[in-house]
Amino acid sequence: MSKHIIVDPITRIEGHLRIEAVVDENNVITDAFASSTMFRGIETILKGRDPRDAGLLTMRICGVCTGTHYQRSIEAVENAFDVTIPKNARLVRNLMQGALYVHDHVIHFYHLHGLDWVDITSALKADPKKAVEESFKWCKTPYGVSESELIQIQARLNKFVNEGRLGIFANAYWGNKSYKLTPEQNLIATAHYLQALDLQRDAAKMMAIFGGKQPHPQSIVVGGVTCVQDIQNPARLALFKTLLKKFTHFIKTAYLPDVYMAGSVYVQDALDGIGSGLKNFLSYGDFRLDDTGFYKSALLFPSGMVLNGDLSTLHPFDQSKVAEDVTHAWYEASGPQHPFDGTTNPKYTGLEKKADGFAYLKTNEKYSWIKSPIYDDNRVEVGPLARMVVGVAAKDERITKYVVNFLTNLGNKLGLGGPAPTGALFSTIGRTAARAIETELMADVMHEWIDELMANAASGDLNTWTKFDFNTVSKDAKGYGLAEAPRGGLGHWVKIKDGKIENYQAVVPTTWNAAPRDHKDRMGAYEAALIGTKLSDVNQPLEILRTVHSFDPCLACAVHIVDTKGKELSRFKVGTNCSI
């Protein structure tokens, strides 16, 4: 007999997300539906505004990845008016975006996703001395896990438990059978969880050095950047490099070893493809490596699409093939729309209250505030796994090197006598591993960029802006800013008429991944990834959280609610229980 599970809200994410799942008599998920419960309307308030100001508004889409929305919006205007930025501006933008990557990925693993793998209360049973020995299995110089430090962390946890207040670790599914790490492994990961809370300030400082502040930086403008004095000041550049070195050390001696450790324990889930989902991957491409012009530069992350997990074929990316469908979203439109012509016309049809007293999604109708993006008539996944998969399919030397190195190290630690199979990446744990691979790659390449910026400034090149006279260009134009936010492909499209914004659309990573079914009834990435997942306890759907969190949801990016006159529209009381 099947059961219908509602998990609302999904916690440890940005925004509000509801998952409904149908499980069979063996507790295996046979159907799933993802729904955002907040309305998106920020594009509407941009109409009629000066396009040069759009970045300052669109960065408010989210309180996490503010800078990447800011930069995409600025680049959309630069693309519309064919403005090419100077080298220093390119490097500064790369460094700001790179700092966001390493910051976001580390926070995601430890503070948003890690507790899906790590049982905090199990760490209380650990032997600190054995935990130290365990840490050396995964790293030659493990980070912050001396016996005395682990004893102190264990004492802190015991104090929380004895006082009946777990604080940030409360209300979780501790003791669930799906947790597989040993007490010692759980203690190591808990130590790094707490240490990462403190270290994340360094990544925020890196972004603030060039951005002026974090979040909501303010140094990017149409034509370049305004942080001239920071580029001129060797001390500021040296500070960035020092902070980067410190954070890179944590990535290599804590984050990566912890992913190896978790990967070895959950390797069978990866080999079984648990959480694999669509196996269609899309990357817009990002991080320009030269100054040959808009969308002409060599890229750190190649663009393209991989279908059905086939790494032998890379399909080229063409922004004209992006469209959004609203068949199952709470909007109305005549059919799939390209973002240049996209509309945001809400049409809320509500939930269905059934005899059991619970309100359910009308899954045969509209059931989410997220639109359903389609690329060339395909549903796709975006994000770190997509970037690594596309990079390998593109035969990119740098990305392939990092992916192969990770799989080889994991294979050696598992005693396989060779690399772990690439197919293991097509899974929930593989998605988590891909984010770690990317974080190491990003940290390493940022050292190259800061050295390049320092050398360029030392040579006397202090140019940070391309002269741009808004009054002399055509006032009717359109452009797009396409790149890769930490969570995946992010695009901003703008149409300008008489020097003002006529239409604006942002298609963000979580729009791609968290979308409902489309006009052909094809699932979105979250929904597809949940199919076939077996729950150890339907009253504690930890496995649902684990797979959904592996995408790092940011519903605040995907949906927004706003009243331009400041009126209160509605009040909501959100429950925290899983109902069956």
Image: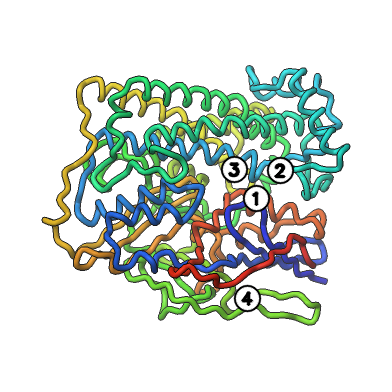
Mark 2 surroundings within 10 Å by alpha-carbon count, few (fewer than 14), some (14 through 19), many (20 or more): many
Q: CA distance from mark 3 to mark 4?
A: 30 Å
- Which residue position holds label 3? 108
Sequence-wise, the earlier of marks 4 and 1 is 1
Mark 1 closeness class: few <14, some 14–19, many ≥20 residues within 10 Å: some
* Marks 2, 4: nearer the viewer: 2
List x then y, in percent, for residue 37. Answer: 59, 67
- Residue on which the image places disc 4: 363
Question: Visible in this render: residue 294?
Answer: yes
Instruction: Provide the residue designation for mark 2.
Output: 115
Camera-nearest residue between 93 and 228 = 228
CA gap, disc 2 and disc 3: 10 Å
- Please give left or right for residue 285 compared with residue 255 in the image: left
Q: Is residue 213 above or below residue 54?
A: above
Sooner in the amino-acid sequence: mark 1 or mark 2:
1
Residue position for label 1: 12
Distance from label 3 to label 1 (Cα)? 9 Å
Q: Earlier in the sequence, mark 3 or mark 4?
A: 3
User: At label 3, which amino acid type do we have?
Assistant: His
Local packing at callout 4 (Cα closer than 10 Å; few below 14, some 14-19, many 20+) is: some
